[in-house]
Image (cartoon, helix red, strand yellow):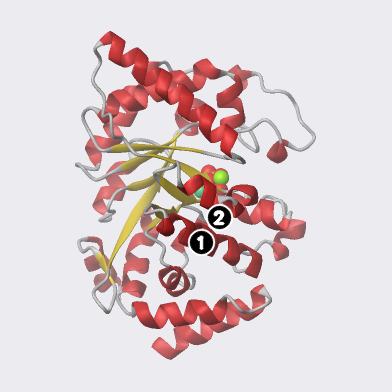
Amino acid sequence: RRKSLEAYAARPAVTADGTRVELAANIGTAAEAGAAAAQGADGVGLYRTEFLFMNSPSMPGEEEQYRAYLEAAKLMEGRPVIIRTMDIGGDKELPYLQLPKEVNPFLGYRAIRIGLSRKELLLTQLRAVLRASAYSKVKVMFPMISGLQEWRQAKEILAEAQAELRQEGVPFDENMEVGIMVEIPSTAVMAGQFAREVDFFSIGTNDLVQYTLAVDRMNEHVAYLYDYFHPAVLQLIRTVIEASHSAGKWTGMCGGMAGDPLAAPLLLGLGLDEWSMEAGRLSPLKEVLAGLDRQECRELAERVLLLDTPQAVRQALEEFRESKS
Ligand code: PEP
Ligand code: MG
């Protein structure tokens, strides 16, 4: 079994009916892209850049960021790397930013909210990403977007960074893809409006579950309620994927659900385009996908989306899994 799993690292992910599935890795540092490439990732679906900031005693400058982004991209040897702008706040602190103490940090000053109010931070990061785009295939996405206005403001700051670089004669990819994370229910509900403007979506189930179900993702006392198989979460996921496809865009998933083999048939059936997970989960996922038929999974998804509790969903998925073994 171990041997056969290792063999999957060298192969692309393909389902039993021959559908090629894009499997990417989540990384927290540029160096981790090496492990992702070794595990046969098709790209990096989520580069959590906040660790670059958290591992530094002071704010990393544009040059340092540029070098980190380029290093990650080089290690992926031409495969795309999605760089998420920093997601500080919530449970992630940054001493030199001196963030306010908050009663509800997960509902507070976090991620893109910081980037939009302290514009020089986001501008510097976007300049670094753009510079890396001249030499490698990078994409950028914004975390914790809750409405169109935030997305448009972030795009404006991106346009500013582009204008500056153009003026300075610094090269960058004019066609770099720009997307958003879908991790707040309001954005999932409004996916149709977003889909006209963004290049792609990446669903962050870790936060999407927390905010949809009002269950703190870190609180063990309510952990029994924290479940991405909750029917409300599944409906939001379907809404996002369908909205993106209607507009000719694509949807990935970089939250923990993407790496769960039990969820794989459901997500395949819903039409998810890209799956991003910890590198160690790639081979087990490829093994599961290799046994799945897409049409059969579509029918499974239709049935599962009608169920009314997370327990019923899990049971249906477990029964499906057993029917395959
Ligand atoms: C998520 O919320 O699902 C996600 C991928 O982002 P993070 O876990 O970094 O909050
Ligand atoms: Mg998140």
Q: Alpha-carbon neighbours of circle 1 within 10 Å: few (<14), some, or many (≥20)?
A: many
Q: Is residue 17 visible?
A: yes
Residue labelled with disc 1: 257
Residue labelled with disc 2: 205
CB at disc 2 and ligand 1 closer than 8 Å: yes
- SS label for mark 2: helix
Would you place residue 70 above or below residue 186 in this image? Answer: above
Foreground of the two, 317 or 10: 317
- 188 with respect to 224 (left or right): left
Real-space Cα distance between discs 1 and 2? 6 Å
- The quarter of the picture where residue 252 lies is bottom left
Q: Earlier in the sequence, mark 1 or mark 2?
A: 2
Which x, y percent locates residue 3? 25, 71
- SS label for mark 1: helix
Which x, y percent locates residue 170? 25, 15
Three-letter amino acid code at the position of disc 2: Thr
